[in-house]
Image (spheres, rainbow, N blue to C red):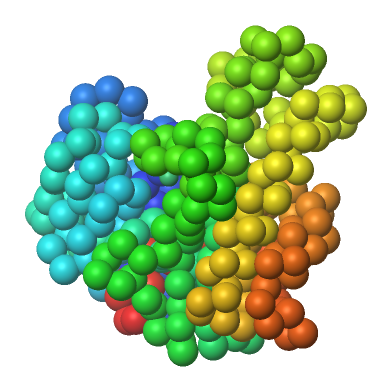
Amino acid sequence: MATLRGGIDLGGTKIQTTIVDRKGEVEGEARVPTPTEGAPEDVARAMAAALRKAAAAAGVEPGELEGIGVGSPGDADERTGAVSAARNLPGWEGSFPLGEWLGRELGAPVRVGNDVQVATEAEFRLGAAKPYDSLLGVFWGTGVGGGLVLDRNPWIGRGAAGEIGHVVVERDGAPCTCGRLGCMEAYAGRAAMEIEARRRLEVGEETKIFELAKKKGHDRLKSGDWERALEHGDGLAERLLDRAVGALGTGIASACNILDPEAVVIGGGMGLRFADRYMEGLRAEILEHLFVSDRPPAIEVAELGDLGGAIGATLLFGR
Ligand SMILES: [Zn+2]
């Protein structure tokens, strides 16, 4: 039997787990909702249960795995496996020894990394960025996360690199969920876009987007709601998406001016949903701000989809 590894992608709404072989072929997977109440230990327990389910699907015991990688939001310390300030998760303002806890529970070595960084590495090793030596991963969803591979090596700085969502695209600009002003995410993050749409509705702009979302039973706007609004000719949705793409292009170009990567890979719920519609617009926005514009980076769409984060987490073993 080939050596198998486990991967867990810990998201704000779901926990995706996978079991892969050394080539990254998926042997089993499972997905459970992320607990919305309780403490970090409750989340960790749900993660362990989901990993066991994926292992069962692959016909293996968790303890037989070569290792289990975890892609986590918040401040994930690769050295210790501790995760702190994961504010989208219940009761996780402080620090929790996630790697240690899961290792004990599942009986296999566990490594913990940043969710967006491991998804970027998955695209580099197995997905859209295979032909390149350096890339910037941009995951456009509720927020905007980034990851870096430079000269074929992951780059995490002192642990906080790649936070492209908080590159400033407008000084003293829109308020960001991080508490600062003018971050790219304050314009492009789906959460910030929803806040802005509600604000504009209150001051009299017309939009059908909230009705459309309600019909689908969504109390928060999802990527599909933005798409449906566009299809209904919703002017406000169109203006906010154009604004988001402008901010993304500005922020990405600024990062490229510093790093000059060969490729930029766009993923995330919004990124995948709007790749076809907005890729050309995004490319144009990036070009406008690139200092050396005669050889822009390739702009690619992430290929590994929903499983990318969990597959990327397995790559924490064998980097
Ligand atoms: Zn910010």
Q: Nearer the viewer, residue 214 or 14?
A: 214
Image x and y of residue 96, in percent: 14, 45
If the picture is divided into quarters, which one holds ligand 1?
Answer: top left
Query: Can residue 53 be seen in the rendering of this structure?
Result: no
Image quadrant assignment for residue 197: top right
Residue at image position (57%, 75%) is 257
Image x and y of residue 42, in percent: 21, 33
Point out the image quarter for the N terminus.
Answer: bottom left
Point out the image quarter for the C terminus.
Answer: bottom left
**Residue 308 left/right relative to 43:** right
Q: As displayed, is residue 227 above or below residue 148? A: above
**Residue 13 left/right relative to 291:** left
Image x and y of residue 146, in percent: 48, 60
Q: As displayed, is residue 268 above or below residue 155? A: above
Image quadrant assignment for residue 87: top left
Query: Can residue 301 be seen in the rendering of this structure?
Result: yes
Q: As displayed, is residue 314 above or below residue 34? A: below
Q: Nearer the viewer, residue 114 or 148?
A: 148
Residue at image position (27%, 29%) is 90
- Count of numbered circles in the view: 0
Residue at image position (37%, 76%) is 155
Image x and y of residue 99, in percent: 17, 56
Residue at image position (43%, 48%) is 16
